[in-house]
Image (cartoon, rainbow, N blue to C red):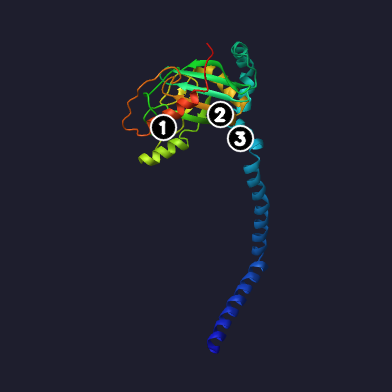
Amino acid sequence: MECRNAGILRQLNFIFCDGCKATEILWSNGLMKKLVIISVVCFFICIPVIILYIYGRSLWFPIYLKWRGLRTVSEVQQKIETDVLKRLYQDFNQADIQLPLNRLCIIGLKEEKKLEIWGMKNDTWIFIKEYPFTASSGSLGPKLKEGDRQIPEGIYRVEGLNPNSRYHLSIKLDYPNPFDKAKGKIDGRIDLGGNIFIHGKAVTIGCIPIGDAGIEELFYLVNQTGKNNVMVIIAPYNMRNKKKKIVLDEIKWKEELYNKIKKQLSEFQKEI
Protein backbone atom coordinates (compact mmCIF):
# COMPACT_ATOMS: atom_id res chain seq x y z
CA MET A 1 0.00 0.00 0.00
CA GLU A 2 2.87 2.37 0.91
CA CYS A 3 4.61 1.64 -2.39
CA ARG A 4 1.39 2.31 -4.24
CA ASN A 5 0.88 5.63 -2.43
CA ALA A 6 4.47 6.60 -3.10
CA GLY A 7 3.93 5.89 -6.81
CA ILE A 8 0.85 8.08 -6.89
CA LEU A 9 2.70 10.92 -5.15
CA ARG A 10 5.55 10.70 -7.65
CA GLN A 11 3.05 10.88 -10.53
CA LEU A 12 1.32 13.90 -9.02
CA ASN A 13 4.67 15.55 -8.38
CA PHE A 14 5.67 14.91 -11.98
CA ILE A 15 2.41 16.34 -13.31
CA PHE A 16 2.62 19.38 -11.03
CA CYS A 17 6.27 20.06 -11.84
CA ASP A 18 5.64 19.45 -15.53
CA GLY A 19 2.72 21.89 -15.40
CA CYS A 20 4.85 24.46 -13.62
CA LYS A 21 7.58 24.11 -16.22
CA ALA A 22 5.03 24.56 -19.02
CA THR A 23 3.68 27.66 -17.30
CA GLU A 24 7.18 29.05 -16.88
CA ILE A 25 7.90 28.49 -20.56
CA LEU A 26 4.66 30.22 -21.58
CA TRP A 27 5.32 33.11 -19.21
CA SER A 28 8.91 33.50 -20.37
CA ASN A 29 7.75 33.61 -23.96
CA GLY A 30 5.17 36.26 -23.07
CA LEU A 31 2.20 34.09 -24.08
CA MET A 32 0.84 33.76 -20.56
CA LYS A 33 1.10 37.52 -20.03
CA LYS A 34 -0.86 38.11 -23.21
CA LEU A 35 -3.53 35.60 -22.17
CA VAL A 36 -3.88 37.26 -18.76
CA ILE A 37 -4.11 40.74 -20.31
CA ILE A 38 -6.68 39.59 -22.90
CA SER A 39 -8.75 37.90 -20.18
CA VAL A 40 -8.72 41.01 -17.97
CA VAL A 41 -9.59 43.32 -20.88
CA CYS A 42 -12.43 41.04 -22.02
CA PHE A 43 -13.80 40.91 -18.47
CA PHE A 44 -13.87 44.70 -18.07
CA ILE A 45 -15.41 45.19 -21.54
CA CYS A 46 -17.97 42.37 -21.53
CA ILE A 47 -19.43 42.99 -18.08
CA PRO A 48 -20.38 46.65 -18.75
CA VAL A 49 -21.76 45.70 -22.18
CA ILE A 50 -23.94 42.97 -20.67
CA ILE A 51 -25.18 45.32 -17.93
CA LEU A 52 -25.94 48.04 -20.50
CA TYR A 53 -27.80 45.55 -22.72
CA ILE A 54 -29.98 44.29 -19.86
CA TYR A 55 -30.59 47.46 -17.84
CA GLY A 56 -29.88 50.26 -20.32
CA ARG A 57 -32.38 49.41 -23.05
CA SER A 58 -33.97 52.85 -22.81
CA LEU A 59 -30.60 54.37 -23.75
CA TRP A 60 -29.41 52.18 -26.61
CA PHE A 61 -32.66 50.91 -28.16
CA PRO A 62 -33.80 54.28 -29.62
CA ILE A 63 -30.35 54.68 -31.20
CA TYR A 64 -30.60 51.18 -32.65
CA LEU A 65 -34.05 51.96 -34.12
CA LYS A 66 -32.81 55.21 -35.68
CA TRP A 67 -29.87 53.33 -37.19
CA ARG A 68 -32.34 50.93 -38.80
CA GLY A 69 -34.65 53.75 -39.88
CA LEU A 70 -37.41 52.69 -37.47
CA ARG A 71 -39.56 54.68 -35.03
CA THR A 72 -40.04 54.47 -31.27
CA VAL A 73 -43.43 54.51 -29.54
CA SER A 74 -42.69 57.93 -28.03
CA GLU A 75 -41.76 59.37 -31.45
CA VAL A 76 -45.05 58.15 -32.95
CA GLN A 77 -46.99 59.39 -29.93
CA GLN A 78 -45.50 62.85 -30.31
CA LYS A 79 -46.06 62.90 -34.08
CA ILE A 80 -49.76 61.95 -34.00
CA GLU A 81 -50.73 63.73 -30.77
CA THR A 82 -52.03 67.03 -32.21
CA ASP A 83 -54.25 65.45 -34.87
CA VAL A 84 -55.48 62.70 -32.56
CA LEU A 85 -56.48 65.12 -29.80
CA LYS A 86 -58.39 67.26 -32.31
CA ARG A 87 -60.33 64.22 -33.51
CA LEU A 88 -61.00 62.92 -29.99
CA TYR A 89 -62.03 66.27 -28.48
CA GLN A 90 -65.71 66.03 -29.40
CA ASP A 91 -66.00 62.36 -28.32
CA PHE A 92 -64.48 63.02 -24.89
CA ASN A 93 -66.45 66.22 -24.44
CA GLN A 94 -69.72 64.45 -25.25
CA ALA A 95 -68.85 61.57 -22.90
CA ASP A 96 -67.96 64.09 -20.17
CA ILE A 97 -64.64 62.38 -19.46
CA GLN A 98 -61.12 63.80 -19.53
CA LEU A 99 -57.69 62.67 -20.59
CA PRO A 100 -55.59 61.03 -19.40
CA LEU A 101 -57.71 57.98 -18.58
CA ASN A 102 -56.79 55.95 -15.53
CA ARG A 103 -58.33 52.82 -17.05
CA LEU A 104 -59.35 51.89 -20.57
CA CYS A 105 -61.44 49.02 -21.93
CA ILE A 106 -61.65 47.93 -25.57
CA ILE A 107 -64.66 45.78 -26.53
CA GLY A 108 -64.66 43.93 -29.82
CA LEU A 109 -68.01 42.64 -31.11
CA LYS A 110 -67.43 40.19 -33.95
CA GLU A 111 -70.96 39.86 -35.35
CA GLU A 112 -71.57 43.63 -35.21
CA LYS A 113 -68.02 44.27 -36.48
CA LYS A 114 -67.52 47.10 -33.98
CA LEU A 115 -64.80 48.06 -31.53
CA GLU A 116 -66.04 50.05 -28.53
CA ILE A 117 -63.86 52.30 -26.38
CA TRP A 118 -64.69 52.83 -22.69
CA GLY A 119 -62.97 54.90 -20.00
CA MET A 120 -63.22 54.70 -16.22
CA LYS A 121 -64.61 57.70 -14.36
CA ASN A 122 -65.45 57.65 -10.62
CA ASP A 123 -65.38 53.82 -10.63
CA THR A 124 -67.91 53.75 -13.49
CA TRP A 125 -67.26 52.75 -17.08
CA ILE A 126 -68.17 55.50 -19.56
CA PHE A 127 -68.71 54.85 -23.28
CA ILE A 128 -66.51 57.13 -25.41
CA LYS A 129 -66.76 56.01 -29.04
CA GLU A 130 -66.68 53.05 -31.40
CA TYR A 131 -64.83 52.08 -34.57
CA PRO A 132 -66.13 49.81 -37.34
CA PHE A 133 -64.00 46.83 -38.35
CA THR A 134 -62.54 47.66 -41.76
CA ALA A 135 -62.23 43.93 -42.53
CA SER A 136 -63.06 40.63 -40.87
CA SER A 137 -62.26 36.94 -41.16
CA GLY A 138 -63.44 33.63 -39.76
CA SER A 139 -66.79 33.01 -38.08
CA LEU A 140 -68.36 33.19 -34.63
CA GLY A 141 -66.47 31.08 -32.13
CA PRO A 142 -63.05 31.25 -30.44
CA LYS A 143 -59.68 30.85 -32.10
CA LEU A 144 -58.42 27.28 -31.73
CA LYS A 145 -55.27 26.91 -33.82
CA GLU A 146 -52.75 28.57 -36.08
CA GLY A 147 -54.14 29.36 -39.52
CA ASP A 148 -57.86 29.01 -38.72
CA ARG A 149 -58.37 32.74 -39.53
CA GLN A 150 -60.46 33.15 -36.37
CA ILE A 151 -60.53 36.34 -34.31
CA PRO A 152 -60.06 35.17 -30.70
CA GLU A 153 -62.82 35.43 -28.12
CA GLY A 154 -62.13 36.10 -24.47
CA ILE A 155 -60.70 38.63 -22.05
CA TYR A 156 -57.23 39.84 -22.95
CA ARG A 157 -54.50 42.28 -22.01
CA VAL A 158 -52.28 44.47 -24.17
CA GLU A 159 -48.87 42.91 -24.58
CA GLY A 160 -47.20 45.72 -26.51
CA LEU A 161 -47.37 48.52 -29.07
CA ASN A 162 -45.76 48.29 -32.50
CA PRO A 163 -44.93 51.70 -34.03
CA ASN A 164 -43.38 50.02 -37.09
CA SER A 165 -46.25 47.80 -38.15
CA ARG A 166 -46.86 46.96 -41.80
CA TYR A 167 -50.44 47.96 -41.03
CA HIS A 168 -49.59 51.53 -40.02
CA LEU A 169 -49.65 50.98 -36.23
CA SER A 170 -50.67 47.98 -34.14
CA ILE A 171 -51.53 46.85 -30.62
CA LYS A 172 -50.57 43.28 -29.69
CA LEU A 173 -52.90 41.22 -27.50
CA ASP A 174 -51.80 38.45 -25.14
CA TYR A 175 -53.49 35.66 -27.11
CA PRO A 176 -53.21 32.85 -26.19
CA ASN A 177 -53.96 33.89 -22.62
CA PRO A 178 -53.91 31.46 -19.63
CA PHE A 179 -57.51 30.39 -20.33
CA ASP A 180 -56.74 29.62 -23.99
CA LYS A 181 -53.62 27.66 -23.04
CA ALA A 182 -55.43 25.65 -20.36
CA LYS A 183 -58.24 24.64 -22.74
CA GLY A 184 -55.76 23.88 -25.49
CA LYS A 185 -53.93 21.50 -23.15
CA ILE A 186 -57.19 19.76 -22.19
CA ASP A 187 -58.16 19.37 -25.86
CA GLY A 188 -54.69 18.23 -26.88
CA ARG A 189 -54.22 21.20 -29.20
CA ILE A 190 -50.55 22.21 -29.46
CA ASP A 191 -50.23 25.05 -31.98
CA LEU A 192 -52.77 27.63 -30.77
CA GLY A 193 -51.46 30.39 -33.04
CA GLY A 194 -50.52 33.89 -31.93
CA ASN A 195 -49.58 37.37 -33.10
CA ILE A 196 -53.09 38.78 -32.73
CA PHE A 197 -53.25 42.56 -33.16
CA ILE A 198 -55.62 45.46 -33.40
CA HIS A 199 -54.17 47.42 -36.32
CA GLY A 200 -54.73 49.85 -39.16
CA LYS A 201 -55.45 49.31 -42.88
CA ALA A 202 -58.30 47.07 -44.07
CA VAL A 203 -56.97 43.51 -44.22
CA THR A 204 -56.99 40.64 -41.74
CA ILE A 205 -56.56 36.89 -41.24
CA GLY A 206 -57.56 36.84 -37.58
CA CYS A 207 -56.76 40.33 -36.27
CA ILE A 208 -59.02 43.38 -35.86
CA PRO A 209 -58.33 46.21 -38.34
CA ILE A 210 -59.94 49.62 -37.72
CA GLY A 211 -58.26 51.80 -40.35
CA ASP A 212 -55.30 54.14 -39.99
CA ALA A 213 -57.11 57.03 -38.28
CA GLY A 214 -58.76 54.64 -35.84
CA ILE A 215 -55.55 52.86 -34.86
CA GLU A 216 -53.78 56.20 -34.37
CA GLU A 217 -56.39 57.23 -31.81
CA LEU A 218 -56.40 53.89 -30.03
CA PHE A 219 -52.59 53.61 -30.11
CA TYR A 220 -52.39 57.05 -28.50
CA LEU A 221 -54.95 56.21 -25.81
CA VAL A 222 -53.38 52.86 -24.91
CA ASN A 223 -49.90 54.35 -24.64
CA GLN A 224 -51.11 57.30 -22.59
CA THR A 225 -53.20 55.12 -20.26
CA GLY A 226 -50.49 52.48 -19.88
CA LYS A 227 -50.90 48.94 -21.19
CA ASN A 228 -51.28 47.52 -17.68
CA ASN A 229 -54.43 49.63 -17.25
CA VAL A 230 -56.10 48.37 -20.43
CA MET A 231 -58.53 45.46 -20.72
CA VAL A 232 -59.70 43.97 -24.01
CA ILE A 233 -62.93 41.97 -24.29
CA ILE A 234 -63.69 40.19 -27.56
CA ALA A 235 -67.19 38.70 -27.79
CA PRO A 236 -68.87 36.74 -30.60
CA TYR A 237 -71.78 39.22 -30.50
CA ASN A 238 -73.26 41.87 -28.21
CA MET A 239 -74.28 39.65 -25.28
CA ARG A 240 -75.63 42.62 -23.33
CA ASN A 241 -78.82 43.05 -25.32
CA LYS A 242 -79.48 39.72 -27.02
CA LYS A 243 -79.06 36.00 -26.75
CA LYS A 244 -77.87 33.90 -29.63
CA LYS A 245 -77.24 30.19 -29.92
CA ILE A 246 -73.84 29.43 -31.43
CA VAL A 247 -73.43 25.79 -32.45
CA LEU A 248 -69.91 24.66 -31.59
CA ASP A 249 -70.30 21.00 -30.69
CA GLU A 250 -66.56 20.34 -30.77
CA ILE A 251 -65.92 22.91 -28.02
CA LYS A 252 -66.93 21.43 -24.67
CA TRP A 253 -65.93 24.57 -22.72
CA LYS A 254 -67.95 27.01 -24.85
CA GLU A 255 -70.47 27.85 -22.12
CA GLU A 256 -67.70 28.48 -19.59
CA LEU A 257 -66.05 30.95 -21.96
CA TYR A 258 -69.27 32.73 -22.93
CA ASN A 259 -70.48 33.03 -19.33
CA LYS A 260 -67.14 34.61 -18.48
CA ILE A 261 -67.41 37.12 -21.34
CA LYS A 262 -71.07 37.90 -20.63
CA LYS A 263 -70.37 38.58 -16.95
CA GLN A 264 -67.53 40.97 -17.83
CA LEU A 265 -69.65 42.76 -20.45
CA SER A 266 -72.42 43.40 -17.94
CA GLU A 267 -70.27 46.21 -16.44
CA PHE A 268 -70.50 48.16 -19.71
CA GLN A 269 -73.95 49.60 -20.28
CA LYS A 270 -74.61 52.55 -22.57
CA GLU A 271 -76.90 55.29 -21.29
CA ILE A 272 -80.09 55.61 -23.32
Tag 2 residue: 161
Look at the numbered disc 2 and give the secondary structure of its residue. Answer: strand
Look at the numbered disc 1 and give the secondary structure of its residue. Answer: helix
Look at the numbered disc 3 and give the secondary structure of its residue. Answer: helix
Q: Please determine whether, in this image, residue 260 is positioned above or below residue 130.
A: below
User: Callout 3: few (<14), some (14-19), or many (20+) C-alpha neighbours within 10 Å?
Assistant: few
Name the amino acid type tagged 3. Tyr
Q: Residue at x 38, y 31 (%)?
A: 254
- Coordinates of residue 62 in the picture (x, y in percent): 63, 32
Q: Residue at x 58, y 30 (%)?
A: 227
Q: Residue furthest left?
A: 249
- Coordinates of residue 218 in the picture (x, y in percent): 56, 21
Disc 2 versus disc 3: nearer the observer: 2
Q: CA distance from mark 2 to mark 3?
A: 17 Å
- Coordinates of residue 81 in the picture (x, y in percent): 63, 19
Report whether 119 appears left or right of 176.
right
Q: Which mark is residue 256?
A: 1
* Residue 7 appears anywhere in the view: yes
CB within 8 Å, label 1 to label 2: no
Tag 3 residue: 64
Q: Please determine whether, in this image, residue 218 is positioned above or below residue 182.
A: above
